[in-house]
């Protein structure tokens, strides 16, 4: 397996030209994010990812996590790497200083997280879930919950989990059966603080890092129904259930009534323990309510939106790793002759089709990075901009793009990893090279955190149909000036990108109108087009950002690093020629592709 090396040039370029990092660093509260700090953090994160986290990727795949005497043991080296990660302060980069965080921009954190994800996806999942728990508790926790739990979660001394799924409740979270019973008199109950204290009963499945050997405590965020609450999503509440009970002074007390029952055997991410968790096999797992009773889905959405962004990041991370591996292999593997010069025994990178595959991997990965950092920059503006209108606007864009970020980056991540296997030929199918691991690891990302079909429904319904397509159309309008600037350029690459981007924007505009109007006529028809619509949305948005990068590269090419800038421009051109050009086909599928889907009866399938 090729060792991971952080692609710092492209990371810096995307931070500057897509995320507008210089402007973000001027937002109130981000004064610490100076260019020197940024450079230092990126360099050090790159080293930590390459030297500590990355080398464990293969070990994690081969060894996997295991359950021994009721305790989850992670693969050799995972725990030590996590301890070094926490000691290095990497867990706390974006969090609020009042809880021990470093208060640095989320966009910078995204760049750092990309490195963990690429170096070792299975290992990176644990801190990823903690981020979601911190966000949910920061937004909805009681002052007491925040005081007791946030500093430990921010530092990484404890980790967080997300417990939604049950055997009968996957995409349909409202079908969950876990229940919570209010403790009538909480005095004398360990960890009691009076009031809203509950005992939680139920079984959750597929819980990522539901248990592990990294830390003394695990903070479970659990969805359950309080006895007597309405059925469906309206009757769900969110509970904080620690693995080990916590006293008023923050010290650890007795073990709570929660345990991992078994671990799943999986296609990929073997290092990450995927647990079946039993809550309340005895007296009931003690938990406290987060937010209000029956308001659990709203609270959980804070966590899920964060997690959806971060799962999109995993798509980017696995793609980057697969791309690095394929590039190295293509430069080493000797096979055949150069079709133009006739030279024999050339490395396969000389064959046009291999170059096509490599460029499709490179351009898609850079496009994902651009989309991810752009999205992260919207979070920073939404949190920190001094003007209300700017904050609202950034939040609206972030909301619109959340399902696109999750689904487009994870679908594209799978395609890239798949192409990586193809570049290796037969050796791609043999585990020894490591190419197959990236493909297996990437395959979960379109499934968890809301399948990509559910993301497409979210884009179609909540994000587009609900406001009659207004936000989507406004966003399309924001992308048009770059298309016009590109199309008017004298440079042939830029002009070609501009033409294809303008056409892609037209297609996206028409498809948006169709999703709104078609949905009014027959919701089944619109729903059948939701995934192609999301793909079109992702392709065009990423094509826009790649076009902006090409413009920036063209302007910067006089200032040194000319080969990087030329590669950037050509890579953006490739993306336009191979991905943006699919826009017309996708529009046709959105508009006309539902016929058979709706026409056939179940028994005709
Ligand atoms: C390795 C792994 C780790 C996980 N980690 C966690 C975790 O930490 N916490 C947690 O709570 N869960 C976790 N999950 C669960 C994961 O989020 C669910 O598997 C996922 O949400 C899908 O649910 P399901 O498996 O029940 O599939 P189903 O909901 O049964 O879906 C099956 C198929 O039907 C489609 N479908 C279902 N409903 C609809 C609909 N309304 N419209 C259109 N299509 C639909 C889906 O898109 C999918 O293609 C994990 C799962 C795995 C495999």
Image (cartoon, rainbow, N blue to C red):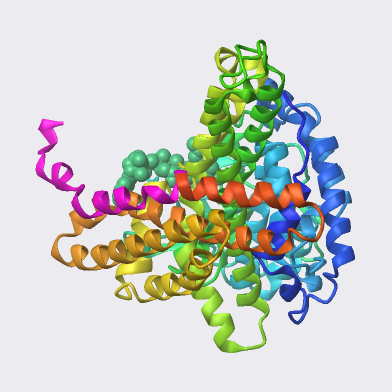
Position of the C terminus by quadrant: top left
* Magenta stretch bounds: 578-605
Q: Picture coordinates of residue 171 (x, y %)?
A: 38, 48
Q: Is residue 6 magenta?
A: no
Q: Is residue 597 magenta?
A: yes
Q: Which of the two residues, 388 or 535, is positioned nearer the viewer here? A: 535
Q: Can residue 560 be spotted in the picture?
A: yes
Indicate left or right for 219 with 547 as reference.
Answer: right
Tell me if residue 310 comes above or below residue 101 in the rendering.
above
Residue at 62%, 63% (x, y): give it: 551
Tell me if residue 484 comes above or below residue 495 in the rendering.
below
Indicate left or right for 276 with 594 as reference.
Answer: right
Q: Which of the two residues, 424 or 342, is positioned nearer the viewer here? A: 342
Residue at 77%, 40% (x, y): give it: 214
Taking the image in four quarters, ligand 1 sits in the one at top left
Tell me if residue 471 comes above or below residue 388 in the rendering.
above
Residue at 10%, 38% (x, y): give it: 601
Q: Main secondary structure of the magenta part?
A: helix
Label tally = 0
Position of the N terminus by quadrant: top right
Q: Picture coordinates of residue 53 (x, y %)?
A: 78, 37
Indicate left or right for 601 with 540 as reference.
Answer: left
């Amino acid at each position: 397996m090729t060792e991971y090396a952080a692609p710092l040039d492209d990371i810096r370029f995307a931070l500057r030209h897509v995320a507008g990092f210089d402007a973000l660093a001027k937002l109130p509260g981000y004064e610490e994010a100076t260019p020197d700090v940024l450079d230092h953090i990126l360099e050090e994160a790159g080293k930590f990812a390459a030297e500590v986290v990355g080398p464990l990727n293969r070990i994690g795949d081969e060894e996997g996590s295991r359950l021994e005497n009721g305790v989850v043991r992670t693969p050799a080296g995972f725990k030590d790497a996590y301890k070094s990660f926490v000691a290095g302060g990497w867990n706390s980069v974006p969090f609020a200083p009042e809880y021990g965080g470093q208060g640095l921009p989320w966009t910078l954190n995204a760049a750092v997280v990309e490195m963990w994800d690429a170096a070792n996806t299975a290992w990176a999942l644990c801190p990823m879930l903690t981020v979601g728990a911190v966000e949910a508790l920061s937004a909805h926790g009681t002052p007491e919950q925040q005081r007791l739990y946030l500093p430990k979660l921010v530092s990484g001394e404890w980790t967080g989990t997300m417990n939604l799924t049950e055997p009968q409740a996957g995409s349909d979270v409202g079908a969950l059966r876990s229940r919570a019973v209010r403790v009538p008199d909480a005095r004398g109950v360990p960890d009691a603080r009076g009031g809203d204290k509950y005992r939680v009963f139920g079984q959750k499945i597929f819980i990522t890092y539901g248990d592990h050997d990294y830390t003394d405590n695990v903070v479970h965020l659990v969805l359950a129904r309080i006895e007597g609450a309405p059925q469906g999503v309206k009757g769900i509440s969110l509970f904080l259930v620690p693995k080990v009970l916590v006293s008023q002074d923050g010290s650890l007390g007795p073990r709570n009534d929660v345990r991992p029952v078994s671990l799943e055997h999986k296609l990929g991410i073997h290092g990450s323990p995927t647990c079946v968790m039993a809550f309340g096999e005895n007296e009931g797992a003690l938990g406290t309510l987060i937010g209000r009773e029956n308001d659990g889905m709203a609270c959980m959405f804070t966590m899920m939106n964060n997690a959806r962004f971060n799962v999109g990041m995993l798509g980017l991370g696995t793609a980057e790793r697969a791309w690095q591996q394929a590039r190295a292999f293509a430069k080493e593997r000797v096979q055949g002759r150069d079709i133009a010069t006739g030279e024999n025994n050339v490395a396969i990178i000389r064959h046009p089709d291999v170059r096509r595959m490599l460029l499709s991997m490179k351009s898609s990965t850079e496009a994902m990075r651009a989309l991810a950092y752009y999205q992260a920059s919207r979070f920073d503006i939404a949190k920190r901009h001094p003007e209300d209108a700017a904050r609202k606007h950034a939040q609206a864009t972030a909301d619109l793009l959340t399902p696109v970020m999750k689904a487009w980056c994870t679908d594209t991540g799978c395609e890239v990893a798949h192409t990586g296997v193809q570049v290796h030929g037969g050796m791609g199918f043999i585990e020894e090279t490591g190419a197959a691991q990236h493909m297996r690891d990437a395959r979960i990302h379109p499934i968890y955190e809301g399948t990509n079909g559910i993301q497409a429904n979210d884009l179609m319904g909540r994000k587009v149909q609900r406001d009659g397509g207004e936000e989507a159309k406004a966003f399309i309008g924001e992308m048009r000036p770059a298309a016009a600037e590109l199309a008017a350029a004298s440079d042939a690459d830029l002009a070609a990108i501009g033409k294809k981007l303008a056409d892609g924007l037209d297609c996206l505009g028409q498809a948006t109108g169709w999703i709104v109007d078609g949905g009014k006529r027959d919701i089944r028809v619109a729903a059948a087009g939701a995934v192609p619509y999301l793909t079109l949305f992702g392709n065009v948005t990423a094509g826009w950002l790649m076009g902006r990068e090409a413009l920036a590269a063209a302007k910067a090419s006089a200032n040194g690093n000319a080969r990087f800038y030329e590669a950037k421009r050509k890579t953006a051109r490739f993306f336009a020629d191979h991905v943006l050009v699919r826009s017309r086909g996708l529009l046709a599928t959105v508009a006309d592709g539902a016929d058979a889907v709706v026409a056939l009866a179940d028994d005709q399938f």
